[in-house]
Amino acid sequence: MKVILTADVDTLGNAGDVVVVKDGYARNFLLPRSVALIANERNMAVYEKVRQQREAEASRAVRDAKSLAEALKEVSCNVAVRAGEEDRIFGSVTAQQIAGALNDLGFDIDRRAIEIEEPIRALGVYDVPIRVHADVEASVKVWVVRE
């Protein structure tokens, strides 16, 4: 049976692919879980329109992410922390603190998008990568200063 995949299936293919599977696999697994549609002319036409809409939305999201990444390149934020002797801070600077500092500057960045490679435990200037989109990454200059 020919089916159109509506979601990625590890052993079968990606969303939008037209694949041939055994009838029982399609009837008992793929179709009840809404992972596939039977590949007839009507479903092919409908799914083609949906695929075009998804591609347009994806390209718009990438374009918006690139413009946000360009804006973030120009930004530097300050994170004020308590520090002891030799400019060592108590604890470390977290992604939540950086996200809060960016939100204060007007950027709505989720803390999970901030990728700190190793903990920031000293005062100074750091370049912190931010995953704006799956394909777009930006870098923000973070100044860790004494409170």
Image (spheres, grey):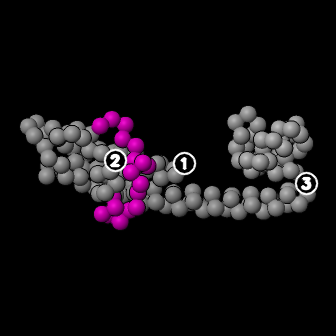
Work out which residue is located at the far left of the displayed protein and give it.
85
- The image shows residue 45, relative to residue 130, as above or below, that is below
> On the image, numbered disc 2 is attached to which residue?
95
Confirm whether residue 15 shows in the render: no
Mark 3: secondary structure: loop
* Residue 118 higher or lower than 104, as above or below: above
Mark 1 → mark 3, Cα distance in angstroms? 33 Å
Mark 2 and mark 1: Cα distance apart in space: 18 Å
> Tag on residue 83?
none
Q: Residue at x 34, y 47 (%)?
A: 95
The answer to whether the residues at label 1 and label 3 have Cβ atoms under 8 Å apart is no
Highlighted range, magenta: 102-119
The quarter of the rendered structure image containing the N terminus is top right
Whichever of callouts 2 and 1 sits on the residue coming sooner in the sequence is 2
Q: Taking 89 as reference, is 6 left or right?
A: right
Dot placed on the residue nearer the N-terminal end, 2 or 3: 3
Task: Specify whether 35 is left or right of 79.
Answer: right
Q: Residue sitting at 46 percent across and 60 percent down?
A: 68
Q: Residues within 10 Å of mark 3 (few under 14, many from 20)?
A: few
Task: Kindly identify the amino acid type of the residue bearing the numbered disc 3.
Answer: Asn
Residue tagged 3: 40
Residue occupied by mark 1 = 134
- Residue 86 location (% of width, % of height): 10, 36
Q: Percent from the top left, x then y, of residue 70?
A: 45, 58
Q: Secondary structure at mark 1?
A: loop
Tell which circle, 1 or 3, labels the residue nearer the N-terminal end: 3
Q: Residue at x 91, y 54 (%)?
A: 40
Query: Does 1 appear in magenta?
Result: no
The image position of residue 81, as x and y in percent, is: 18, 49
Task: Name the dominant secondary structure of the magenta segment.
Answer: loop
> Could you say where residue 130 lies in the image, as x and y percent from the top left?
42, 48
